[in-house]
Image (tube, rainbow, N blue to C red):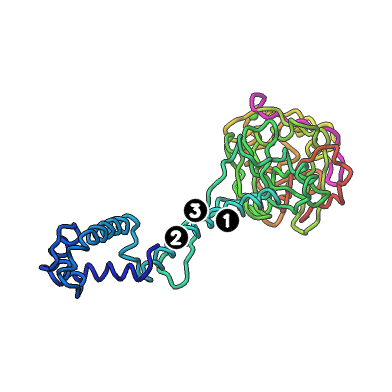
Amino acid sequence: MRSRSHYLFLSKFYKYCKQNPVRKQQAISFASGRGTCEAHQGFIKATAHTSACAHTYLMPLVVSLFLVLNMVWQCHAGAFPPLSAKEECMLGLSELKQSIQTLDHKLVLGEWQLQNLREYRYFPPPKLRQISIPNDTVTYKTTAPLLPLGPGNLLVHDKDCSELYDRLQPPSGFYRIKPKAASEPFLVYCDMEDGGGWTVFQKRRNGKVDFNRDWADYRDGFGNYELWNDEFWLGNENIHSVLIGDEYLLKIDLMDWNGQTKYAIYDNFKISDEKDQYRLSVGVCSGQAGDGLSGGTNMVEQWSASLSGMQFSTRDQDNDRYLQGNCAEENIGGWWYNRCHAANLNGKFYRGGEYKGENDNGVVWGTWRGLWYSLRHTTMKVRPQHAMAGLGSGAGPEG
Ligand SMILES: [Ca+2]
C-alpha cells in the first residue's frame, strides 16, 4: 500500500498537468529525462539557480524513472481511483445477499432431510418460498431442492408400518413404505394405535370418495391421503407387495351410525398377484363382528358368500362365480365377490345405515348388522402375525 502523502503527490501531478497544458509538455519532457532547466523549474516550482541544473543532471533521470514506474505500479495495483464508501457498501451488500441465498438453500434442504430421517413422515414437495430483506426492495424466490424418490434414494424405507413402529413408534399418520416386492416406495396410512404397526389399506368414513371404479383404479389405488379421516383404497398391487414378505393378520374395524364398534380378525391373510386376479385367502376368523368374509356359519350362505379363494372383480372385469351377471356392477364396488357376498366394504355409502334397493350393495358386514345396513366407518388393516403381542383392545383408534 502506498502512503496517503504519496497518493496526494500523484493527484497533484495530474491536476497540475490538466490545468497547465503547456507545462504538461514540460512536465512530460521532464519526466522523460530530456527536459530543460525551465521545465524542471516549472514542474517542481524550484527556486534553484540554472547553474545548479547542470550538476544535478542525473537527478531528473532518477526521479522521472521513479515516477513512471510508480504510475505503472499504481495502475496495475488498481489503487486508484479508490472506491467510494457507498460503492464499497454496495459491493459488500451484494456479497451478503449471495451468501444468504446459498445458506437459505442449504437450510431448506437440511430441514427436509432432518425431518424425514427423524420422523419418517411424508412431506409434500416444499412450495415456493419468498424471503424479503428489510429495507431492501430485492425479494428472493427459491424452491427447495428435491431429493429423488425411488431406488437409489439415500433414505431408508421400512417395509411396512409394523417395521416403522418397531423402530420409532411414531404417531398415526401417512408414511412412505417400501416392501421388498415393490419397485417404488408408496404412501400409506399407518395406524399406530390399537397396538400399533398397522398398515391400513382401506378406509370408509364419509362417502366423499367414489368406490365404484374400474380394475386399473383398484389395482393402483385411489382416494385421498392427507387427513386422518380421508377415504382410500391402497391398491391391490401395493397390498400384494406388502403381504408377500411375511404372514399377515387382517383386522377389520367397523362402526355403525350409532357409534357402536365391532371388529373381526383373520390370520393368514394373502392376496395373489395380478396374473391370478389378486385372489383372496384368509384363515381363521376371530373377533366380535362375525365371519363376514365367509358368509357366516350357514353352509348355504357360505356357498354363495364365502370370499376366501375368490378372485377380485370390478365393474369392468367380472371374475366372480355369479354366472347371471357381474357382482361388482350390482354391488357398486370392487371386491372378491363369489355369488355375490355377505360382506361388501367397498360398496355404496348410504347415510344413516338402513337402506333399500334391488341389491344389497351398501357398505355391508352381514354377520353383524345384516345385508341391508350400510356401515358408517370401516377400516381394513394388516400387521405381521408375529406382532400379535401388543394387539391392544381391538376397538381401533377412532372406532
Ligand atoms: Ca359374473
- The part of the chain drawn in magenta is 274-290
Which residue is depicted at the point 56% across and 53% down? 106
Which residue position holds label 3? 143
The type of residue carrying mark 2 is Glu
Q: Distance between the residues labelled 3 and 2?
A: 21 Å
Q: In this view, does 198 lie to the left or right of 325?
A: right
Is residue 286 found inside the magenta-colored segment of the image? yes
Q: Which of marks 3 and 2 is in front?
A: 2
Q: Distance between the residues labelled 3 and 1?
A: 12 Å
For mark 1, what is the residue? 107
- Which mark sits nearer the N-terminus, 2 or 1? 2
- Tell whether label 1 touches label 3 (CB within 8 Å): no
Query: Mark 3: which amino acid?
Result: Thr
- Residue 264 image point, x, y percent: 82, 43
Q: Distance between the residues labelled 2 and 1?
A: 18 Å
Q: How many marks?
A: 3
CB of mark 1 near ligand 1 (< 8 Å): no
Left or right, residue 223 beside residue 344: left
Image quarter of residue 107: bottom right
Displayed-image quarter of ligand 1? top right
Q: Nearer the viewer, residue 141 or 247?
A: 141
Name the residue beneath numbered marker 2.
Answer: 95
Residue visible at 81% across and 38% down? 384
Work out which quarter of the rendered image holds the C terminus and state it.
Answer: bottom right
Residue 284, x across and y down, in percent = 86, 34
Whether residue 279 is visible to the viewer of this picture, yes or no, is: yes
Answer left or right for 192 relative to 62.
Answer: right
Task: Classify 10 Å Cα crowding around label 3: few (below 14), some (14-19), many (20 and above).
Answer: some
Q: Which of marks 3 and 1 is nearer the N terminus?
A: 1
